[in-house]
Structures are given as structure tokens and as C-alpha cells.
Amino acid sequence: MQRAALSKPLPAAFWLALAALSLSLAFYAKPLGEALSLEWLVDYPKLWIVPIQSQISAAMHWLIDEASFGLFTLREALRFLSGLMEVPMNLAIEGLATGLLSGTGSRAVEIFPPLSWIAVTVIFAATGHYAKGWALAFVQLACFLYLALFGQWHSAMLTLASIAVTLPFGVAVGLALGIACHTWSGFDRFMRPVLDLMQTVPVFAYLVPILFMFGFGPVSAMIATIIYALPPMIHNTTLALKAVPDELREFGTMVGCTPSQMMRKILLPSALSGLMVGVNQVIMSSLNMVIIASMIGAGGLGYDVLFSLRRLDIGAGMEAGLAIVVLAIALDRLSQALATRHPPARKTTSRAFPLNYPRSFLCVAVIAATWIGGNWIEALQTFPEGWQISTRQYWGELVKAINLNFYDQLEAVKLFFLATLLLPVKGFMLGLPWAWVIGLIALGGYKLGGWRLALLGTMLFGFILLTGQWDYAMISLYLCGVSVLLAILIGAPLGILAAEVKGFSRVMRVAVDTLQTLPTFVYLIPVVMLFNSGDFSALIAVTLYAVVPVIRYTAHGLDQVSPNLIEAGKMIGCSKWQILTKIKLPLAAPHMMLGLSQTIMFALSMLVITALVGTRDLGQQVYTALSQADPGLGLIAGLSVAFIAIVTDRFAAVAAKWLTAGG
Amino acid sequence: MKPAVTKLACRNIWKVFGPGGDRFLRGAAKAPSRDAFTRAGLIVAAEDISLDVIAGQILVIMGLSGSGKSTLVRLMSRLIEPSSGELIFEGKDLRKASEKELIEIRRHKMGMVFQSFALLPHRTVLGNVAFPLEVQGVGKAVHEEKAQEIIRLVGLAGRENCYPRELSGGQQQRVGIARSLISDPHIWFLDEPFSALDPIIRREMQDEFLRLQSEFQKTIVFITHDFEEAIRLADRVAIMKDGRIVQIGTPEELVLAPADDYVRQFTKHVVRAKVVSVRAIMTAPGPDAAYAGSVKATDHIEDIADAVEKAALPFAVQDENGRIIGAVGRRNIVDVLIGREQS
Ligand SMILES: Nc1ncnc2c1ncn2[C@@H]1O[C@H](COP(=O)(O)OP(=O)(O)OP(=O)(O)O)[C@@H](O)[C@H]1O
Ligand SMILES: [Mg+2]
């Protein structure tokens, strides 16, 4: 059956007719429905919404309030757990940011100061030197001095503290699960779909349940971050273990290693650099999460950004956002250098004790000196406020200046896009009768991938419909669709340029890498600065973020076209342009299709975040759930986003297969 | 000569790769044909292999790429499980050994050297060489001392604290050799140990290997696809093709009496004078012949050619006890050198 459906694509005329019909339905469905008293086919009646949301909320309440394991209740268990995790968290916060205090509030007395700014900077510079030498030491030095100089020290240390605790937890759990996947293939088969789902469900979806279980605070933030950072760590662990050469395993067996010796002494050490890539990703994920995590109680830079975004205080937001970027650069470079570091040959010099560990010795000395000296000279302990530079004003003034001088132009651009692109598409999506959309999904799914895909699409969109999220989902789809379209229009030419023009490719790589290290939220700040909140700002932020995979996959797809074919083209006498359009692009198309699915994923994950600037989509629903502590709504809206992601992903994958088979 | 003692014996060993391979083999009443295996989507990497590894000797296994050499040596060390057959190691059935016993046997009685060295990248030379002892739980002081000693033996003194990537290929394989010798194994497996090295280094390593062997007198299974290497090192050579052993014998036997064209292909370009012994070409001694001198029956032609060529008279050939058992003259030697059939 499925074969037959795949092998005979319907004529283009059929799809064109379908599109035309959709267009007219979007405009005339409402009056038509009223005339035929078939409104229920157009707008899903409120009465028919299945009350899953309230049931989930009730279940969560019951779990937290009533559920008991006999000896203790669930609430007590959760409290115990979060109490346990609070210990290292508090320790890190005290050690890096606040110092050990006795008493609370303004009357608190400092018993023990935190690490001084000099000490922290020196420790990172020394680690940089250890990992890669003077250049990296200098980068670390510059980054941390920046944080001190621009008055972001305290918040940055709070953020650093939460990463310092999250990292070992995330790495340990990820490593353990990765090893388990590697050891037991059954467990691997079980974990794979779980990981897939974890990577498509937006963080927001589990924020609310976590908030519900562990309450507002750094521990909740930490748990959310760990869940978010876990999949890449697990993935990298299994990959790295798999990549250990067979001969090394055989060697281990031949010298009589027990299974545990094999893991500890052969597999893990040989896989070290692969594992460190995972560690790097955990760090970057944690940084990516700082702002989201601050919604459920993490302090630090993330909180600063969130707080200023809410007040539309662009200057403060920009400062904190830049500080996150600086911290991300410092930690990214450091962990990458540690990952690729080769231990230098051991020198057998016979220097006296502290001198054979010069870096550690220096760090300990600086810590002690600033700690003791800090009692008399305050500047040794905390960076003096008088030396700090605040850029807040300039940002504010810049915004003001832009708004004064370019208000009309910016507004015109915005209005143009709104009127010609955004509003019509939005109207179209909202006008479409739900029954028609689901019918289209079923038909398209069946034609492209057989009845399985049709069933999957219908069921997942059915869930969105039944739970009453339809209109929000349509807005999400419209924003996502338009942004992806723009991202392709901008990204594909850039990707082609990057692949074709030599000098440009290096510039592009740096730009793409930078865009990818930026935490998602940072995109929002300048956009809001120029265009205020609303759909248009969301569009720009999402497009900026989603353009990265488009460029990358286009360039990569073109790069991997076999040089033999290009030579063959040249010999036939194709012009450069003909080679590009007739040989390279068609051959790169399947690869670019895979990039499309990535692009949609990126767009959806960013879309949820843009709820902060006032869109009315599923992201906003999650956000509402968060502020009302409504776990049912949070879960349903989050799952709806995940379902859209899953369906588009599967459709794009099938379409890519079609392109390879047909082309 | 000492009587030959068998260290490790393979008896009708089979290995079938592919899903359900073992069942397919066991299910058949008598051995299925190759076609039957291929049709079932299975690969026969070892077919009904029986051979003895003699204590103190070097057995070289050779054959083209994909002929099943690596598979055979991994079957012998039970790195992969045979589909059927018996493995007798030092008189005991190796296949009946428990996991624990196997670990003990491998720790103390087997050593292996790998084609691409398989050194641990995160450990220094010293750390790599001492690793087997560390796994056994031997104290640090003891294993470091022993490792130092064996590192000196393979000529890497002064390099103890280097990491593998700081060494040349030849040096890396010396580390591999040192490491496999440190627990003083009874049997020593080497899977194409020198194949990754360039020709000059390879010869140097072969000399080194022979030197070590004259010192330790190990029982060795050595794999190569290079016939020159095989005849330089081997006491006996087993030639493999498509998972079968085609012929097994001394290099001289292979050169003089190849079992089929496959073996002849290998031996064709060998410098025969290096392989053939006097015994193989001597003629019956005349009743009262005059001799220019005497040579031993076990001498290779190469060693005596110059002397025989210079003399006008033939040489007498003596056995171990000094009895004259034949004669060898210029013509016999020229026959060998130009590959002419003996008249
Ligand atoms: N794990 C495996 N699964 C399936 N087939 C295998 C496996 N290992 C080896 N084979 C097959 O068994 C045959 C023998 O392989 P083997 O590696 O023993 O050859 P080799 O003589 O060592 O070759 P080379 O000189 O290339 O190392 C080959 O056809 C190979 O494809
Ligand atoms: Mg091999």
C-alpha cells in the first residue's frame, strides 16, 4: 500500500487546486459555516474542549498535597531532595558571591568573605594558561576584568555559582546514563525516543511542573537546567565510547581487565576528548538556560536580563546580556581548550615543592593574600564601585536617539511587514477551518509517507484541538512559518556565498559560530530596543536565530558535492552559474532539506521565548501558566509545541527522502 | 633436538559471522557448502581449522587480506567465540574456562601485540608498559621497576615519560611489544605487528624481534601478509585462503613443494637460496670422490654458495653426526638460483 502511495506522486495541478481552495476557505469559511449551520467545523466549540488541563492540575495538586508513600508524603520527599541539593548550591553561592553570612536581610554579618574578584580572575587565567597557554590566559583575564569593570561582577558570580553546581550534577548523571546506554542495548533502545522527546519539548513545558514540585528557587532552576543539558551529554558519552577503537577494547580483554577496569581504565580515559565535548555542551546549555531558569528562581545575570526586559529597561538588559555573552565566551573557550589539551611530556625537573606546581601555588597565594589583605584594603576583596563603568546610560540614549531620528523609518518598515506579510498570513491561518487543516495534514501525510505519518499528524494535531490550544497553535505556526521562510531567503544566499567565495567563508564561519554561542534571549534585547514588543520583534528574533542552521546546511551541502562531478561539468563547458544551478544545488538539495527540519526546530524553540515580547501564541500560554503556577496549562501548551515540532520534523524528513529518490 | 610439545591446539575450529551463524552450522548434519552459507547471508571466516602451536617455536600465519588471519588469532585467544570446535591450551580445554579463569589465563599466560599498536593515548610509555601489571593489582613500586627494565630491553630507555603521540611508529610498536611481554606470557600473539611501518623500520623491527625471541624462547603466533617476513621469522608457516588453511610447513617445504597455485603465487618471488637447505639439493655421494671441503645438511644455500662456487671440486654434505650423506657442487647451486628443475 505504502509503496504504491510513494511511487505515484499526484500531479502538481492537484496541489495547486488544494492551495486555491484553502485560500478561499480561509476567507469564506466563516460566513459559509454560518449559512450552513456548520460553524463547529470552522471554529472548534469551547464546550467540546476536553478538560485535560484542569485534570492534570488537579492530579498535580493531589500528588503534592496528598500523595504519600506510607512513611512519608511526596511533598516531604521532594522537600528532602531539594534540601539536599540546596547544600552545594548555597555553598557555591556563598563561596563566589555573597560570602558566609549570619542572620538575614540588612542586618546580616559577614563571617567569611567570598572569593575576591582578583582571586577568581587569577584562577581562571591560570586555568587558561594550563589549558592552552598565554593567549587563553589573556582571554580569561580580559573577560573577567570586563565583568568587574562593567559592574556585573556580583550577578556574574551568582550565575557562575549555579553553573559550577549544575555542571558536576549534569555531567555525572549524563555520564552514568550514557554508560548505561553503552553497556545495555535494551536501555539504549528505551532511552532513544525519550531523548528525542526531551530535545523537542521546549524547556518551558517542564518549567511549570518543576516549579510545582520544588517551589520557586535556585534548586528548581538547577533541576530544569540539568534536564535541559542532559541529552547532549548522554549523546556525546555514547558517541565517544562507541568511537574507542576495537583494538583498544581487545587489548583490555587480553590483559585481563574486568568489566569495571575496562570501563574505568580503558574506555573512559580513551574517550576523554569526546566526553569533554559533552561537558562543553553542558556548560553552554546551562548558559543558554540562565534567563529561562531565572523565571523559576535563579538569580544572577539571567534575572537581570529578565527583569530589565520586563521593564523595557534596554540599557540594563544590554549590559547584563553582554555580560552573559562574555561569560559564555570565557567558559566556552576554556572548556574547549581543556577538551583538546594534550598533556605535555612530564619533565623530570627537581624543583622544590610549591614551585613544581607554579599555577596552583600562585592561585593559593593570591586567594590567601586577597583574603587577608581584604580586611584592610576593601578594593582587594570587591571591585570598587568608583572604578566601575556603566554603559547603561549610553544604551538608553542610543535607543532614544534612534527613536528620535529613525522612528518614522523603523515604524514604516515594521508597518510594511505587518501589512504585507504578517497580518495576511495570520488572518489566513486563523481563518482556516480546523477540520480542513487536519484533513490536509492527513492527506499530505498519507501521500508523502503513508498511513503511519497521516495517523501521527492527525493524532498530535487532534490533541492540540481537543485541549483548546488550536488558535494559539495556529499563531505559533504562522510566526514560525514566516520566520523560517525569511530565514531561508536570507540564509540560503549567504550559505551559497560562504561555499562559493573563499574569503567569505571564514567570515561567515565566525559569524555563525558567534550567533550560536549567544544565549537565545540575547537576541531579543536589540530587537526590542528598535521595534518595541509585538509580532514583528518576535519575527526578527526568531529569524536571526533560525538563519544559523540554514547557512550552515546550505554551505555544507554545497561543499560535499563530489569534485569529480564539478570537473565533469566544467569539461562539458558549463559556466560557473550553470555548475551552481544545474549540478551543485540539485545535489545539495536533500542535505538542505535536513537543514530545514533543524531550522524549524530552532525557530520553534526561539518562538517560545519570544512570548516575552508579547506574542499571543503557545509560548504565551506557557508563560501564563508559569505566572499562574498552572501545571496543566503549562504541560499542555508545552506538549503542543513539541507536537508541532515532531510533525514538521517527520514531514521534512520524508520530503528530504523524496527529493533524494526523485532527483 | 627437544621433542615437540604442543602449547595450543585448534581442533576443527569454525567461525561463521552473521546473524544466526552458529545455529546454522550446528543445525547442519554435515558441514554445509560455501554456497549454502552465502545464500544464508553468512560469512565463513574460519573453516574446520586444526593446527598445533609448538612450544618455543614461531608459527607464522599468512594469507591475503580478508583470508581470516585476524579472526584465527582472535579465536585462539578467545577474543571471539568459535562457532564450533575445540581449543586446547596447555592441556586444558580453553572453551570450558569460566570468565574468571579466562581473565586469569589472559593476565598471566597470554600476550598480544596489535597492528595499530593499541596504545592508551592518555598514558606515558611507562604507564602503558606497566598497565598489565597494574590491572593485576601488582604494587606500583614493583610494576614500575619491571616496566623500566623491559623498556630498556626494547631500546626505549630515556623515553619513559613520553606520550605515545610523541613517538614514531616503530617506537610505538616497541612500546606495544614491551607491554605484551611484561607479564611474561606463555604464548605470544602478534597480529601484523609491523604492517603499519615502512620497509626499513620493518626490517629493523624484525631483527629486534628475533633478538628478543632468542632471549625469551616464547611460543609465538605471528600474523603477516608478507611472505618475506614469514620466511625470515618462521619455524613453520600456515597459509590461509578464504578461512581455510591451505598448507602448513617449514618455509623450505612451501617453496619446494607448494600445495597449489595459491601457495606457488606466494613463493614464486622468494629468493630460494635463502630458504632451501643443502639437504634438499645434494646428490648421492660418489664411492671415492674427492671433496673441496664439507658443509652441513641444514645449511641454507645462501650461506655456502660462495665457497662452493669458487672451488673446482664438489663439497661433502654431513649430517648432525658428521657422517657424509651427500655431495653438492656448482651445478646444484646454479639450478637453485635460476629455478631450474633438478636434472
Ligand atoms: N565482526 C565481523 N562480522 C562479520 N564479518 C567479519 C567480522 N570480522 C571479520 N569478518 C569477515 O571475516 C573475514 C576474515 O576477516 P579477517 O579480519 O580475519 O581477515 P584478515 O586475514 O585478518 O585480513 P587483513 O589482512 O585485512 O587484516 C573477512 O571476510 C571479514 O569481512
Ligand atoms: Mg587482520
Image (cartoon, coloured by chain):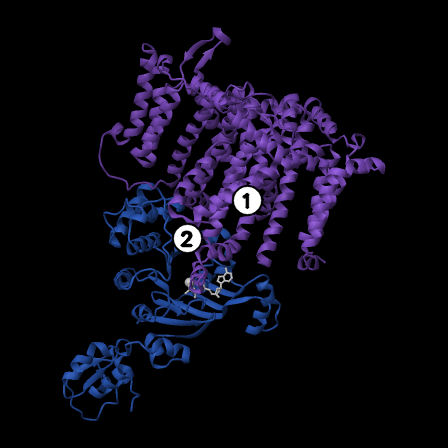
Number of residues whose C-alpha sits closer than 10 Å to that of mark 2, classed few (under 14), some (14–19) or many (20 or more): many
Q: Which mark is residue A352?
A: none
Where, by quadrant of the figure, is residue B214 drawn?
bottom left
Question: What residue is pinned by disc 1?
Answer: A181
Question: What residue is pinned by disc 2?
Answer: A251
Q: Position of residue A653 (x, y in %)?
A: 60, 49
Residue A362 falls left or right of residue A291 = left
Chain where mark 1 sits: A
Chain where mark 2 sits: A
Q: Position of residue B182 (x, y in %)?
A: 33, 52
Find numbered disc 1 in the image and state the secondary structure of the residue it sits on: helix
Give me the residue at 54% from left, 42% from top: A489
Q: Height in image: A33 above or below B239? A: above
Q: Colour of chain B?
A: blue
Residue type indicated by callout 1? Cys
- Which chain is drawn using purple? A
Q: Is residue A418 visible?
A: yes
* Quarter of the figure that contains the C terminus of chain B: bottom left
